[in-house]
Amino acid sequence: MTWKLLSWNVNGIRAAEKKGFPDWLTTTGADLVAVQETKASPDQLSPALLNPPGYQAAWSSAERKGYSGTVTYARQAPLKVIEGLGEGRFDTEGRTLIHEFEPFVFFNIYFPNGGRGPEWVAHKLAFYRRFLAVAQGYMQAGRPVVVTGDFNTAYAEIDIARPKENVNHSGFMPEEREGLGEFFAAGLVDTFRTLHPDTVKYSWWDQVTRARERGVGWRLDYFMVSTDLKDRVLAADIHDEVMGSDHCPISLVLNF
């Protein structure tokens, strides 16, 4: 069987609903859909978002209203759902949902943005390390891992339209790229770049400067898998034709 997985930072799920998100969800045919930056709690949402046909939803909302947040829509009931990374300073903003399924453990994460200053870059890198410790716990126990979401870092120069101009901006700073490199050293595989080593595609564009129209983007959204799933990857893509957010959806297809 195959699993089709999708991920999308929607930059506000209530705004996305007005732009057709429920219709998009029902037409994807995906088994799992990870959504980041929902900016809402379940009591603020319509039935179309809470109970879309064919899916069950798990939500993680920030304590602060209208900020951060994640939801995972699953066709198949998980064995277990865990909210957060088990460390208080990282778990008040609804950034992490972990679903345990029979074939793999699925992480849906909205990683922090370091753009508000050095202390936020440090927080982001500490979050990276905490995530990696949790993921490695599963991998060391023999459990395959899939992690997706907005990682808020472009790893290589091919992943950003203007690398030289942004080397001192959060999202492409050397320490952030090194932090992401630790994921690869620990045994996580960037599925899109593995299948498409020379393809230039972006998943985020600055809306203020109309960067999407000008093709000036960043690849900030990833599907990564543990090495024991690498040979099960059938497809990985970035769907930059889909509008509705400053990010676009990304996808992964696994064969079991």
Image (cartoon, rainbow, N blue to C red):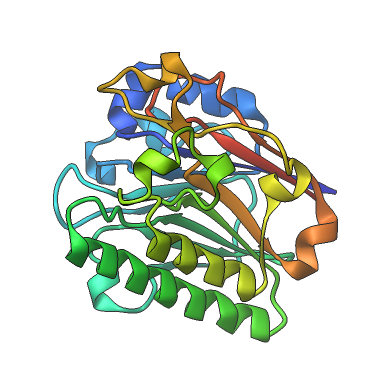
Q: Is residue 49 visible?
A: yes
- Which x, y percent locates residue 206? 33, 28
- Which x, y percent locates residue 101? 65, 64
- Which x, y percent locates residue 95? 35, 58
Q: Nearer the viewer, residue 176 or 61?
A: 176
Q: Nearer the viewer, residue 133 or 143?
A: 133
Say if 49 sits above or below 147 in the image: above
Q: In the rendered image, which quarter is residue 199 located in?
A: top right
- Which x, y percent locates residue 146? 63, 60
Q: At x 48% / y 20%, what residue is drawn?
A: 215
Q: Is residue 110 left or right of residue 145?
A: left
Q: Nearer the viewer, residue 48 or 184?
A: 184
Say if 212 sits above or below 110 in the image: above
Say if 107 sits above or below 205 in the image: below
Q: How many marks are shown on the rendered structure? A: 0
As drawn, the residue found furthest toward the left would be: 64
Q: At x 65% / y 79%, what residue is drawn?
A: 139
Q: At x 46% / y 60%, what residue is drawn?
A: 177
Quadrant assignment for the C terminus: bottom right
